[in-house]
Amino acid sequence: MSEKTVLSIQSFVTHGYVGNKAATFPLQLHGFDVDGINTVCLSNHSGYPVIRGHRMSLQEYDELMEGVRANNFLSNYRYILTGYINNVDIIGRIRDTLKEVRELREKEDKKLTFICDPVMGDDGIMYCKKEVLDAYRELVPLADIVTPNYFEASLLSGVTVNDLSSAILAADWFHNCGVAHVIIKSFREQENPTHLRFLYSVKEGSEAAVRRFSGVVPYHEGRYTGTGDVFAACLLAFSHSHPMDVAIGKSMAVLQELIIATRKEGGDGKSSLKSRELRVVASPQVVLQPSTVVDVKPIS
Ligand code: ADP
Ligand code: CA
Ligand code: CA
Ligand code: CA
C-alpha cells in the first residue's frame, strides 16, 4: 500500500491538459510521487492550428536516465506509466528501462507494474509515425495493463473494433502478447449511439481463464482531448487500493464528471478546442472521489 511512486513518461504541453499535464495532478492528488519524463515539450496539443516546441531525442532520454540511475532513483518506482512518445528509439529504450527497473526491484522483492497507454491516434487519425506501431508491438508484451482507445486497439491487433465481439477479439491479441489486463476504453455501437461501451478483459497467466467485463457511459457530443491520459492516471491511482474492475468503474466516473464539468463551463461539443480542455484542476473532488461509480459488469 505504501509505495506510491510513479515514473510517468509522457508529453508536456505549456497550455492545456494532455500527457503529463493531464496525469500528474490526478496522481499527486491521490498522494503519488510522480517523477516525469517529458517526451516532448510543446506549446499545446496537436489539434490546435499552431504548434511549437521541442521533441526529446534518444540522447536526451539517455542523459536523463543516466542521472536517475546514478542517484539510485530507478529502484523506487512502484509503477511505470507511458503515454505519448512518438519516437521509435525511445520506445525501444523504454524496454531496457523496464527490464532494468524490474531486475532492481526483484532483488528487493518489490513489485513493478507497467501501465502502457499506447498513444498513437484517435477516431481514424494516426498522430504518430507509422514505425511507432511496430515499436509498440514490441513494448506491449512487457505491460501488465494496457489502455488503448478503440482505434489503437484496432491498429495493434489488426481487428477493427466496432462492437463488443470485435473488442473481445482485439483484447485476445493483447492477451496473446502476454498482457494480463486489457481495457479498451470506449467504442460506439451502431445499435446504441447514445452510449459508449468499454471492455475490460483479464487473463493472469497463459494457462489462466479469461474473464471479461463491460459497461457503458453516456456519449457526450464532441471530441475531448486528454481523456485517455486522465483515465490512465486515475486507473493507476484507484487500482493501487481497489480491484481492477472497481478502479475502472471509478475512473470511468471521473471522466464522465470531468466532461460534464467541462461542458457546463462552456466546453460543449461544438465549442472551441480551448474551451474543451478538460477542467482537471478545477475538479479535484471529482478526481479524488467521483460521486458515482460506473457499473463494470461481468459478461456471461
Ligand atoms: P482516448 O482519449 O485515449 O481516445 P477514449 O476516447 O476512449 O480514449 O476516452 C477515455 C474515456 O473518456 C472513455 O472511457 C470515456 O469514459 C471518456 N470519454 C471520452 N470521450 C467521451 C465522450 N465524447 N463522451 C463520453 N465519454 C467520453
Ligand atoms: Ca478518443
Ligand atoms: Ca506479461
Ligand atoms: Ca489516448
Image: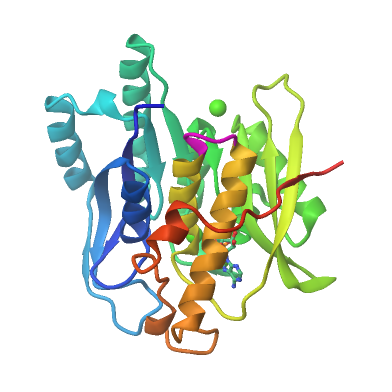
> Which residue shows up at 43% across the image and 52% down it?
288
Relative side of 193 to 1, left or right: right
> Which residue shows up at 50% across the image and 80% down it?
263
Q: In which quarter of the image is the N terminus?
A: top left
Give the image quarter of residue 67: top left
> Which residue shows up at 49% across the image and 67% down it?
258
Magenta segment? 239-243
In depth, the one of 205 and 286 nearer the eye is 286
Relative side of 8 to 128, left or right: left
The figure's colour scheme reads: rainbow
At which x and y percent is residue 299?
A: 82, 44
Residue 89 in view here: no
**How many numbered discs?**
0
> Which residue shows up at 65% across the image and 22% down it?
205
At which x and y percent is residue 121?
A: 51, 63
Does 132 appear in magenta?
no
231 vs 145: above or below: below
In depth, the one of 5 and 175 nearer the eye is 5
At which x and y percent is residue 262?
A: 46, 76
Residue 221 in view here: yes
47 vs 112: above or below: below
Q: In which quarter of the image is the C terminus?
A: top right
21 vs 144: above or below: below
106 vs 94: above or below: above
In depth, the one of 155 and 82 nearer the eye is 82
Does 241 appear in magenta?
yes
At which x and y percent is residue 189?
A: 78, 67
Magenta stretch: dominant SS?
Answer: loop
